Structure formats: C-alpha cells, structure tokens
Amino acid sequence: MTSKTTYRIADLAPDERPRERLKKNGPGALNTAELLAVLLRTGLKGESAVQLGQRVLQTFDGLAGLQRADYSELESIHGMGEAKATALKAAIEIGQRLSVQNPEAKPTISSPADAAAMVQYEMSALGQEHLREILLDTRNRVVGMEELYRGSINFTSARVGEIFRPAVRHDAAGIILVHNHPSGDPTPSPDDLALTKAVREAGILLDIELVDHLIIGQGRYISMKERKLGFG
C-alpha cells in the first residue's frame, strides 16, 4: 500500500519555494497550482498549499471553472475557508479588470485576435449569453464598448435599430459584435448567421460598418468574417 506524498512548503529549500521562485524568476516560472499557493499561503494538515491549489483546480476543472465558481462554492472546499476564498476571488477580479483596456488608451483593432483579447477572459466564463459591441473610429481605434443584451440571444430578440443606437450616439464608424456561447462551443448557429447578415445590411444603409462578429467559447473564438459567414 502506497501513501500519498505530502510536504510543507517550509520543508522545501528556500530557492524551491513558490514565493521565492516568483521573486527571483518571475511569475512565469510557476505553474498554476504554485501561483494559487502564493495566494493561499498555507495548506492544511497533510496537504501543502501547492497540493491544495492542485485540488482546487481539479475540483473546478481548471482556471476557467475556478473563474466561474461563485464564492460559496469556493469557500466550501475543504481547507479553503473565508480568507483563502476571498483572496482567490479578488485575484480573479483583478485579472478580469486588467483584461478590459482603458478606453482612454484607444487600442487599435487590427485583427479578430485583438478584439477577442479585450473580452475573452471575462466572457468565456459567463453563465448566460451576453451580446456586446465594440465601437470603433475611422482608424479602427476603440472608442467604447456597450452591452446590448443578456440572456437568450437570437435574431428575433435582437433589434437591429437598438444595436446601432450606441454607434450613432458615439459617432462610431464601425462596430464589432461579440457574444458568448455558455456551452463553450463557439460554433455559429443559424440565428448567429441571420443576425450577422441583418446587422451588416443595416450598417451599409447607415454607413456604419460591421467590422466583424465574434463568438466566444471556452478557450477559443470564431470570427464570422474570417469564416465568411454573413459577410458574403
């Protein structure tokens, strides 16, 4: 019979401890469980902070699941408690806020990947569908972002006039539609295609270009324009 190997971080050589390695080599030198261990600080009897971090990741099936977990789910994990759960949720929120660019910086969108990078971290973890639009000026610089719908989004519920209202208000030259699929599969649906066609055609009449329509899934996205879906 074999027993599970356990150790305390304090038992490790100083240059092998996560906090010291992060300080010396940067956060990229640590794996995800070790990064969580830095936040958790301590484990529990028979389980180090790193092992606790590994168990948390396994429980929620990775970082994306951890991001989606609510506070009560996290706090209920054996060995977590209020302080550790609070630290993890705070760190996740900081990462989420960092993923949203400062509008004053006016980042330029030169590819679908640029647009996806602005929203993917947050939107891939949402439990229901959200439809948003990124507003662009004539140089494809971001001038704002608006949330249009939340809940089940389809061609009949999304009114084209309401989609363009923020663009008209901000005098935007173009828009990028973005919505998520909570299932994690970004494969476009017939409704996604119908909505893209309708918005693109209306944009031509309004002289506001539909630059792209992105569908965000779990760890990946699809550009309707790259796939030539609704942009024919």
Image (spheres, helix red, strand yellow):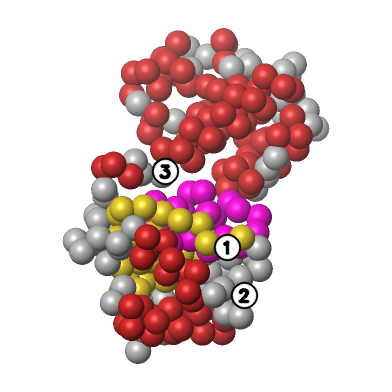
In the rendering, at what x and y percent does residue 154 appear?
60, 76
In the rendering, at what x and y percent does residue 161 appear?
47, 74
Q: Which residues are magenta?
A: 112-133
Seen at 67% across and 27% down, the residue is 85
For disc 1, the marked residue is 149
Seen at 64% across and 46% down, the residue is 68
Direction from residue 91 to residue 99 in the image, left or right: left
Residue furthest front as drawn: 169
Seen at 53% across and 54% down, the residue is 123
Question: Does any portion of residue 190 appear in the rendered image?
Answer: yes
> What is the distance, in whole Å, between disc 2 and disc 3 at their CAs?
29 Å
Q: Secondary structure at mark 2?
A: loop
Tell me whether circle 1 and circle 2 mark residues in contact (CB < 8 Å): yes
Above-or-below relation of 112 to 95: below
In the rendering, at what x and y percent does residue 17 appear?
48, 17
> What is the distance, in whole Å, between disc 1 and disc 2 at their CAs?
9 Å
Direction from residue 138 to residue 133 in the image, left or right: right
For disc 3, the marked residue is 99
Label 3: how many residues lie within 10 Å, few (<14), some (14-19) or many (20+)?
some
Amino acid, disc 1: Tyr
| Quadrant showing the N terminus | top right
| Comes first in the chain, label 2 or label 3 | 3
- Disc on res. 157: 2
Seen at 45% across and 11% down, the residue is 14
| Comes first in the chain, label 1 or label 2 | 1
